[in-house]
Image (spheres, rainbow, N blue to C red):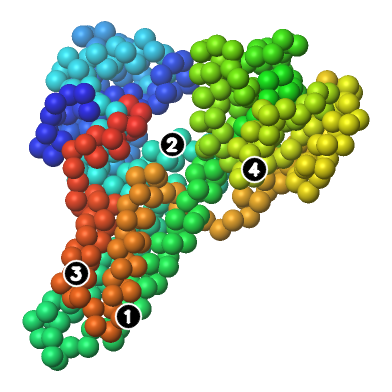
Amino acid sequence: MRRQVDLWLDSDTIAALSTPPGISGLAVVRVSGPRALELARACAPELPQFPRPRRATRVGLVIEGQPLDQAVVTVFPAPNSYTGEDLVEISLHGSPVLVDRLLAALFSAGARRAEAGEFTLRAFRNRRVDLIQAEAVNALIHARTLDGARLALSSLDGALSRRMVRLRGHLIELGAALESEIEFAEEQHIGSIPVLDEVKRARDEIGVILEHAPFNEILAHGLNVVIAGRVNAGKSTLFNRLLGQERALVSSRPGTTRDFLTETIYMDGFPVNLTDVAGWESESLDELESRGIRRGVERLQSADAVLFLVDASRPMSAADSEMNRMTSGHCRLVVATKMDRADDDVVKRIRELHGADDYCEVCALNDPDLPMVRQFLRRRVRGLARRENDFSVSARQRELLRDLEERLNRICAGLEQGNPGVELLAEELRRALDCIGRLTGEITAGDVIEAVFSRFCIGK
């Protein structure tokens, strides 16, 4: 948050446009806080003194005595609103001029311009949602696939939160038993505590969540595919043919692509984000080319799949060998390019090296449909769609879940040994509960809150 305010004590009434800026059929302006109804009535004098909650009311907007627009106003009294405060939504025609004039009037009347994510922050502050659900709101807004939206909605509905609440209850019960063991060591048999089985089940559930997390990320944002290969291997031509347009410049001169280009195509309605990176060269000619190659390597490291291109018209080089090594650990398709000008000996060598891989031979200029390449991408997409996933998990949540899993492993292993170091297990238990608290937001730090909500759009 840019404005230095106490996030837990600030009681300003805030306002912002909640729909995307620009020309549209409708725009929605939100006002939240103790003076929300008062400030809305200042711009809509026809609004009843006691409007019916959650019922749309058609009113005229009047600013400084001049009619501005016909609008629909809906009032959501506290605490049964999105933010947990008095909340008013004003729907007007989507002209930027009208929206700017209304917001200016609200600010002049005493509202403060909302910061990014501040409406959801207030929902979190007022316990309308926990931190897991708040992050799910942002994931739902930015979902690029139906599966991604489904996972985010599941998190927003509390699927992960409920598991954490259950686990917290089991750990508290286990903690009570550990405390009893510390006090009455002769009378307790800690290894036979029934709740231990519940903790083990929770640990195994977390393992499954972490296993699925990378695939959930792909389902939410699309499949990231990097087109890689040596300089002048035909990457940009292949990129253009898959897109169906001349997006990348193509030249017979090596090193045309100095930086990466990313565009999205759709396979069975699923986004595939194609990235054309700078060609690999063992000995870069200049600093600019070296920087382009380094950025390409960074993209390659985070790729979900790789199209590794090998030029069939030129003898294989050290650059081909290096790219083969760098891409071998990825889900990849090896593509022999320029088959219209192929050298028979080179093709033979490529087939020897890659015949056991996913492999195809193409001439992108003569066969723009590239059926084998598209079939590889489609198989990858369909393989993802068959996976069972329950909810979205953010990078922050993954880190905490890994920490939590490790601590549960230590707790379970210690209890199964029969003679555990009870004091050490109690400390692990406390830290596990801290992990859950940071996940749900019961334990928070200002920098964490700022990082989470700063990624939201204004008005949400």
Marks 1 and 2, Cα distance to the nearest angstrom? 44 Å
- Secondary structure category for the residue under label 1: helix
Marks 4 and 2, Cα distance to the nearest angstrom? 35 Å
Sequence-earlier tag: 3 or 4: 4
The residue shown at (44%, 49%) is 392
**Label 4 crowding class (10 Å Cα cut-off): few <14, some 14-19, many 20+?**
some
Q: Is residue 267 above or below residue 244?
A: below
Sequence-earlier tag: 2 or 3: 2
Can residue 329 be seen here? The reply is yes
Q: Are marks 2 and 3 in contact (CB under 8 Å)?
A: no
* Residue that numbered label 4 is attached to: 328
Nearer the viewer's eye, disc 2 or disc 3? 3
Q: Are marks 1 and 2 in contact (CB under 8 Å)?
A: no
**Label 1 crowding class (10 Å Cα cut-off): few <14, some 14-19, many 20+?**
some
Rendered location of residue 414, percent (x, y): 28, 75
Sequence-earlier tag: 4 or 2: 2
Q: Please tell me the numbered disc located at residue 424.
A: 3
**Label 2 crowding class (10 Å Cα cut-off): few <14, some 14-19, many 20+?**
some
Q: Is residue 192 above or below residue 78?
A: below
* Residue that numbered label 1 is attached to: 416
Work out which residue is located at the far bottom of the displayed protein and give it: 187
Q: Are marks 3 and 4 in contact (CB under 8 Å)?
A: no
Does residue 122 appear to the left or right of 382 in the view shown? left
Residue 59, quarter of the rendered image: top left
- Secondary structure category for the residue under label 3: helix
Q: Is residue 42 above or below residue 267?
A: above
Q: Amino acid at mark 2?
A: Ile
Name the residue nearer the viewer: 386 or 28.
386
Name the residue nearer the viewer: 438 or 186.
186
* Residue that numbered label 2 is attached to: 141
- Secondary structure category for the residue under label 4: loop
